[in-house]
Amino acid sequence: MTRAFMGRARPLAAAALVALLAACGGDGNGGDAKDGKDAKAADPAGQKGAQAQQPAQPRAAPAKTSWGKTAAESQQCFNRLQARLDSAAAALKADSAAKNPGAGRNPVFAKEQGWYPKKGEFRDGDLLPCSRIVAYYGNPSSTRMGALGEFPRDEMLRRLQGEVRRWSEADPSTPVIPALHLIAVVAQGAPGPSGHYRAQMRDQAVDSIYQMARSINAIMLIDVQVGTDDVRNIMPRFEEFLKRPDVHFAVDPEFYMRGGIVPGRKIGTMYAADINWVTDQLARIVRENNLPPKVLVIHRFTRNMVPDAEKIQLRPEVELVMDMDGWGAPWLKHDSYQDYIVRHPVEFTGFKLFYHNDTKKGDPLMTPRDVLNLWPQPLYIQYQ
């Protein structure tokens, strides 16, 4: 396996998958889910035409969350991010005796790549860039998929809050938002009834994680591994959850399979066209329901996971995070962050830390201060 793969591709264990499939309620529409399509009522008696003749109403303020900032505050935070990077790059250039900081930690390199990309506007309710999100990732039906399912509920929440404190201490200038990052659609090694090699959690199970997040004033992210299906078929099934102001979305290209390839046999691919469709749907949900912007996390640890990132369209209703998702020694994670995140600017960056896989060869788990040495500094941190 090449260094770029960072050891993540792996066969999926059949016995564990069967158990998880049963716990998730199959791989159809999720048991108690709605139809899964973008259901809009037919226009009764030409009411759309009648509505079109009504005078435009002023847009109400979006639904508030305890973490959102105003558009003006977000713009100020963005300006500070840019100024911080510019200052660090200038200082490094001016120091003729300075050593190369190394892959992923060079502010001059980050600035040369075009960080930070500018989007058209910020909106009231933005979480980024004024805050940093720190998430526990996983599925409650599996102790092996991440911290969210590895520990009992109370212990897991206590551990997450401990990580939030550590990040707050490492960077007191950036408020930390706790998050539960739920893998709600899990790639499978068997086709299942749908033939798409993925299992979907029931609505009741998804809502239980949402309520858990609310108990500590955290946000929730719904993560999907589409298998051989298409995100266009899966995302609408979660629209009722995405209408909540504190629920956000994520897609894992590792398990976005093409040509019927079984998940786990190779690394998948998600194209900009797929991502742009997702951001378009999120933007629509935000507009139609008068919501604050949605965070979208896209995982990445190889070039081909998102081969045309330069074609991704930024939207004011969506805060897009490219998350460095690979595991390994710190030097390997630095290299991958530089090669697959810094070289391909989109909007904001994320960084995943693996309690077990990062340390299984005796390497230390990177600390918050270690991660803050990266340029650009990640604003989404995920623990698995």
Image (spheres, rainbow, N blue to C red):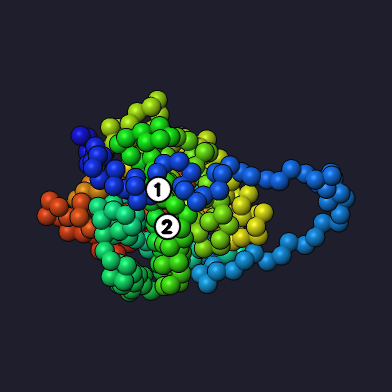
Quarter of image, res 63 = bottom right
Q: Is residue 364 left or right of residue 46?
A: left
Q: Where is residue 379 in the image (x, y as percent from the top left)?
A: 41, 59
Quarter of image, res 105 = bottom left
Q: Position of residue 343 (x, y in %)?
A: 38, 42
Q: Position of residue 316 (x, y in %)?
A: 60, 53
Quarter of the picture containing the C terminus is bottom left
Residue at 68%, 66% (x, y): give it.
61
Query: Which residue is more in the foreground, 373 or 28?
Result: 28
Decide: is 38 above or below 137. above
Query: Which residue is more in the foreground, 102 or 208?
Result: 208
Distance (Cα) linking label 1 and label 2: 10 Å
Quarter of the picture containing the N terminus is top left
Q: What residue type is labelled 2?
A: Ala
Residue at 25%, 56% (x, y): give it.
143
The reply to whether discs 1 and 2 touch (Cβ–Cβ < 8 Å) is: yes
Mark 2 crowd level (few <14, some 14–19, many ≥20, 10 Å Cα): some
Of the image marks 1 and 2, the number of the one nearer the N terminus: 1
Q: Mark 2 points at which residue?
A: 205
